[in-house]
Amino acid sequence: MAKICYYGDDDELHDVQIGPNQPVVFVGRQSTCQIRTAGQSVSRQHARITWQEGRFYLMDLGSSNGTFYLGRRLGAKEAAE
């Protein structure tokens, strides 16, 4: 199990758990995303973080502004481990 900590639009620190009980976390503007922002540079469903067999994967979901990992932009539907 891991905890993702982030600052929300309210400038407050939030966290989301990811692991066997919740293996998928979505990032975006949509109300169903676990990590949400109102920022217009973020797509409704921008990226997905997945826990699978003890590893974490980040995938861009075809966002127009892209998702970056370690300074590198992921291609559409490309996952980073």
Image (cartoon, grey):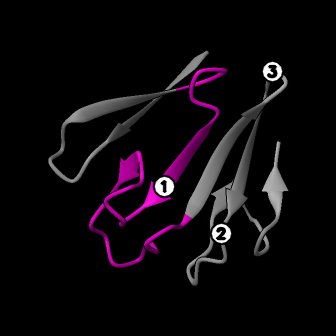
User: Mark 2 = which residue?
Assistant: 61
Q: Earlier along the polypeptide chain: callout 3 or callout 2?
A: 3
Q: CA distance from mark 2 to mark 1?
A: 10 Å
User: Mark 3 = which residue?
Assistant: 54
Residue reaching furthest to the bottom: 64
Amino acid beneath label 2: Leu
Indicate left or right for 78 with 1 as reference: right
User: Mark 1 = which residue?
Assistant: 27
Residue 45 rendering spot, x and y as whole percentages:
50, 67
Point 62% across, 73% down: residue: 66
Label pair 3/2, CB-CB below 8 angstroms: no
Query: Is residue 70 in sight in this rendering?
Result: no
Q: Nearer the viewer, residue 24 or 11?
A: 24
Q: Is residue 27 magenta?
A: yes
Residue reaching furthest to the top: 1
As displayed, is residue 8 above or below residue 12? below
Q: CA distance from mark 3 to mark 2?
A: 22 Å
Q: Is residue 77 magenta?
A: no
Report the magenta residues as a range.
18-46
Provide the secondary structure element on which disc 2 rests: loop
Residue 43 rendering spot, x and y as whole percentages:
46, 75
Amino acid beneath label 3: Gly
Indicate left or right for 57 with 43 as reference: right
Which quarter of the rendered picture does the N terminus lie within? top right
Residue 7 rendering spot, x and y as whole percentages:
30, 41
Location of residue 59 by image quarter: bottom right
- How dense is the environment of label 1, judged by Cα within 10 Å: few (below 14), some, or many (20 and up)? many
Amino acid beneath label 1: Val
Q: Nearer the viewer, residue 30 or 55?
A: 30
